[in-house]
Image (cartoon, helix red, strand yellow):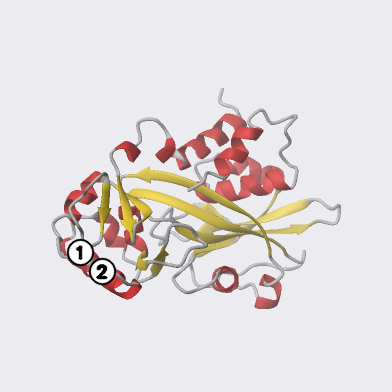
Amino acid sequence: MTTWSEKMLQVLRRMNNFYSPGSSRTTCLRFEVGGEQVGWVPSKVASILSTFPEVFNPPQGGAITLCQNLDSYGRRSDAVDSVLQSLRREGLLTVLKGWRNEKYEVMPRFCDTPLMCMERSATSLFGVKRYGVHINGYCQGENGELRMWVGRRSMTKQTYPGKLDNLAAGGLAAGIGVKNTLIKECEEEACIPEDIAETARPVSTVSYTYEDEEGVFPESQFVFDLELPPEFKPKIGDGEVQEFYLYSMDKVKELLISDDFKPNCAMVVLDFLIRHSYIQPDTEPYYQEFVAGLHHTL
């Protein structure tokens, strides 16, 4: 019988499968912009990119780079976007069918100046880092016990439809800061007014890299804890969530390992359980593995 701990470990391994033996990492090309690595390009994507010699140099020394004349944020962004638009029209890459019209910044590290921006749905083709904000919404009962708000994603969501999710979450779009994204997502997804959303505390980041048939996904989520007044109830906003539930921490813990929970959101809740001492090193054999699995350097 597989224990809770083993199942949780499996979720972490799956979300970090790019680092495991036998992953495509050995055959990926480094994506370099301005002399710095910003991503990993799967070999099948690299061969498609080489049909656009006016934008991409032929792969060399294990890396794929942009042509010399693409030497500014604007030029790089426009040139790559025109390639993506043309690939989207050809319909060869299924991931581009989910075109979002939302741009993500591309840079080696979060603290670096962005070198270009790229359509969100295309980022996995280049394995560029994606950043987001996830909010653990919880409240205290009369006996001091914590309970957590969990959302169920709408069936029309492009990714993980109908799965359980954090109270609110969203990707960091180009030019929008972490705090503004937090306030925007709280308002849009759960109708949480700004004066309450502003009390959310930044507590952690959760970082991992996984791969699937759509590419490489290095992601880092800025995690916030938001204690809500006991009488407050989140409401459905933009329709990205179909329902909210208020669960005991034991119930949430049990749900994390079910197929019902979106895996990266399960990681965000696992981080909450560790920080709030629901998981302790004396009673959790995989405590070290959990902490390491939540914080893989991208």
Which residue is label 1 attached to?
A: 55
75, above or below 253, in the image: below
Q: Nearer the viewer, mark 2 or mark 1?
A: 2
160, above or below 183, in the image: above
- Please indicate, yes or no, whether residue 214 appears anywhere in the rendered image: no
Position of residue 117 in the picture relative to residue 191 (left or right): left
Q: CA distance from mark 2 to mark 1?
A: 8 Å
- Please indicate, yes or no, whether residue 137 appears anywhere in the rendered image: yes
Q: Name the image quarter holding the N terminus.
A: top right
- Residues 11 and 75: in front is 75
Position of residue 291 in the picture relative to residue 118 (left or right): right
- Residues 207 and 67: in front is 67
How many marks on residues?
A: 2
Q: Tell me where residue 292 appears, x and y as whole percent.
A: 58, 39
7, above or below 267, in the image: above
Which residue is label 2 attached to?
A: 70
Mark 1 residue type: Val
22, above or below 270, in the image: above
Position of residue 42 in the picture relative to residue 152 (left or right): left
Q: Quadrant of residue 4?
A: top right
Q: Earlier in the sequence, mark 2 or mark 1?
A: 1
Q: Residue at x 66, y 34 (%)?
A: 287
Q: Residue at x 28, y 39 (%)?
A: 27
- Mark 1 residue element: loop
The numbered dot on residue 272 is none
Position of residue 28 in the picture relative to residue 296 (left or right): left
- Mark 2 residue element: loop
Q: Residue furthest toward the right? A: 143
- Residues 102 and 196: in front is 102
Q: Are marks 2 and 1 in contact (CB under 8 Å)?
A: yes
Q: Tell me where residue 12 appears, x and y as whole percent.
A: 52, 39
